[in-house]
Image (tube, grey):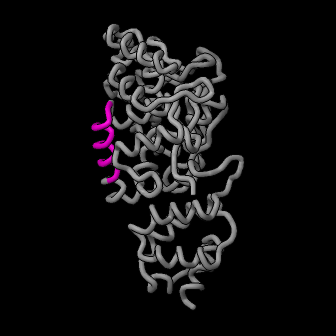
Amino acid sequence: VRTWAGGADVQHRLRVAPTLFSVTGNTCMRAAPAGKRPTETSERNPKKPRASDSKRRVDRAALEAAVSEAEARSLPIAGDEWIESCSRALRSAGRWEWRSRGGSWTPYDRDASEAIEAAIAEGGKASVSVASARRHDIDFSRMHFTCSSGASGPLRHHEATTQVDEIALLQFWLQYAEVEEGQDCLVGPSILKLFEDLDIDASSDVRALIFANECRCSKFGRVSRTEFLVGCISLAASNLDELRAALQRCLKLFDEDPAVAKRYYHFAFRYSLDPPSKVLQLDVAKALWSIFLSPRWGLADKWLAFVEEKCTKAVTQDQWHLLYDFAMQTQTVDDLQAHDEAAGWPTLIDEFVEWVKT
């Protein structure tokens, strides 16, 4: 069973005209030229330099010392390049928001934000799910969404406000990074070493998947430099102790908030696929169900026994997603008595209900 990791750097490119605006109050959302991300500017307040600007003052001596260590280990890291990587990761760690008819700004959830980021990387349009089973079709050239309900409006991107300690992050990265195909990254052994130092069992501890999610990893078994930085910035962690504490806080939210657990559960499916396959191998699915469902679903043991006895095919995304909703609605065998086969559940779930009843 595959246990963890990975992803390639995301290049954000918008193939749109360079001077398009969508005006909202005194704020303009400016569509960027190719290779840039849309930005927010204010008509009344000139843009001030951010703490994350690559040109802000850093401890050059400390930076050069860390870069020298990287060179000694044949890691392809240059000082200015690292500062720019931190700035790029800070932008990626931000959030996307849409404005309602009432004028309030609402953040997209993580799944929708990731879909938006993926669409930007591909230079296309995005269609993402929002509340009440509605969808937003997003046009980046106008920084505008159209809802399936007929409503429409502007959207914007808020960059993360975390203070970034580039030197501390570089020193943290150098503890684990290695070279693969000419790039510094984390792969199998270095990932396992990081988890060992974090007291995480990569094969059974949900914190491993939480970390992959916060890093927005896209490739199993690999964490790129940008992904590592996005994760650390999102979690406000620049060393091992801070990362351990941040993941513990995420674990608490996972245990207490079903919506948070569902987000990590959805990510686990995408992350654990073996491209180009769009279905999840059964042995991987069973291992993940043990991690995600056993602590919170009273019928998890019965489900795993049913899968072991009756299932032979890989798991589709529809089956994966709807099983979580079904699990949150059926904690006991008695809850299955009201099951309606006409309600649109996947056939696999209908078969499970019949298996339990008989």
The answer to whether any part of residue 154 appears in the image is no
Residue 202 part of the magenta-drawn span: no
Residue 142: percent from the left, percent from the top? 59, 27
Residue extending furthest toward the front: 72
Q: Viewed as shown, does residue 67 lie left or right of 132?
A: left
Q: What residue is at 42 percent from the left and 13 percent from the top?
A: 68
In the rendered structure, which segment of residues is drawn in magenta? 239-251
Residue 129: percent from the left, percent from the top? 55, 49
Among the 4 quarters of the image, the one containing residue 309: bottom right
Q: Is the magenta region chiefly helix, strand or loop?
A: helix
Q: What residue is at 58 percent from the left and 51 percent from the top?
A: 272
Q: What residue is at 46 percent from the left and 49 percent from the top?
A: 209
Is 32 located above or below residue 5 in the figure?
Answer: above
Is 285 located above or below residue 98 in the figure?
Answer: below
Task: Out of 238 and 255, give the one closest to the viewer.
Answer: 238
Q: Viewed as shown, does residue 232 lie left or right of 300?
A: left
Residue 354: percent from the left, percent from the top? 59, 85
Is 219 located above or below residue 345 in the figure?
Answer: above
Task: Out of 161 and 20, give the one closest to the viewer.
Answer: 161
